[in-house]
Amino acid sequence: MNEKQNIKQYFIKKNKTKIIIVSAFFILVCSIVISACSWTTGGEDIVFPEENISYMHHVKPFLALNCSYSPCHSDYNRAGGVALTEYWTLFEYGGIVVPGNPDGSRLVQIIEGTLPHFTTFYTGNITENHKKGIRRWIETGAINN
């Protein structure tokens, strides 16, 4: 084999390695994107019971799915100055949650559609069970349990 053929073989081998690395990276990125998006497909796993609604087991997962992610009401973005990531953040901005008064709570007004909101794409994830559950949680004092 002459020097020209050796150089050609070297570059062919080098390009195959690059293709394999780029392909593996592409597959990894696609897998991450698909798995990251899978949690946004719906809230059917979040079911509010008739009583004993828990902030930690019902309300917080509901808010995480529909409200408190980036770029909306996360701690980082705080759209409209409001974060909905933790129990105490629900009370930082007056009127979001008014314990004992679901009709006076902006959260209920927004998810029930009586108060306009900047975006509406999240509404496909909200079921009647969610609306009633958030309403009942606030009605019973919006307890951190």
Image (spheres, grey):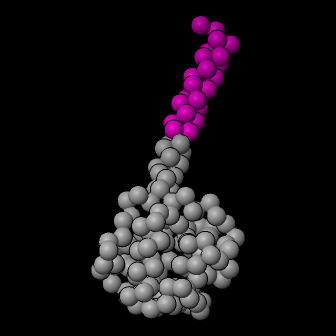
Q: Quadrant of residue 75?
A: bottom right
Along the viewing direction, whichever of 87 and 18 lies nearer the viewer: 87
Instruction: For the N terminus, give its image quadrant.
Output: top right
Task: Say which residue appears at 43% left-offset and 73% top-offset.
Answer: 132
Asked if residue 114 lies left or right of residue 29, the reply is: right
Task: Say which residue appears at 61% left-offset and 71% top-offset.
Answer: 113
Q: Which residues are magenta?
A: 1-27
Instruction: For the C terminus, give its image quadrant.
Output: bottom left
Outermost top residue: 1
Q: Is residue 123 above or below residue 105?
A: above
Along the viewing direction, whichever of 11 and 136 lies nearer the viewer: 136
Magenta stretch: residue 33 in it?
Answer: no
Q: Main secondary structure of the magenta part?
A: helix
Q: Is residue 97 above or below residue 109?
A: below
Total of numbered circles in the picture? 0
Along the viewing direction, whichever of 70 and 8 lies nearer the viewer: 70
Q: Could you tell me residue 123's position as x and y percent? A: 57, 62
Q: Could you tell me residue 126's position as x and y percent? A: 50, 64
Q: Could you tell me residue 93's position as x and y percent? A: 60, 89
Q: Is residue 88 visible to the viewer in this orientation of the structure?
A: yes
Magenta stretch: residue 5 in it?
Answer: yes
Q: Is residue 75 visible to the viewer in this orientation of the structure?
A: no
Along the viewing direction, whichever of 52 and 24 lies nearer the viewer: 52
Asked if residue 54 lies left or right of residue 40, the reply is: left
Asked if residue 25 lies left or right of residue 55, the reply is: right
Q: Is residue 31 above or below residue 54?
A: above
Task: Say which residue appears at 61% left-offset and 20% top-offset.
Answer: 12
Q: Could you tell me residue 52's position as x and y percent? A: 29, 80
Q: Quadrant of residue 120?
A: bottom right
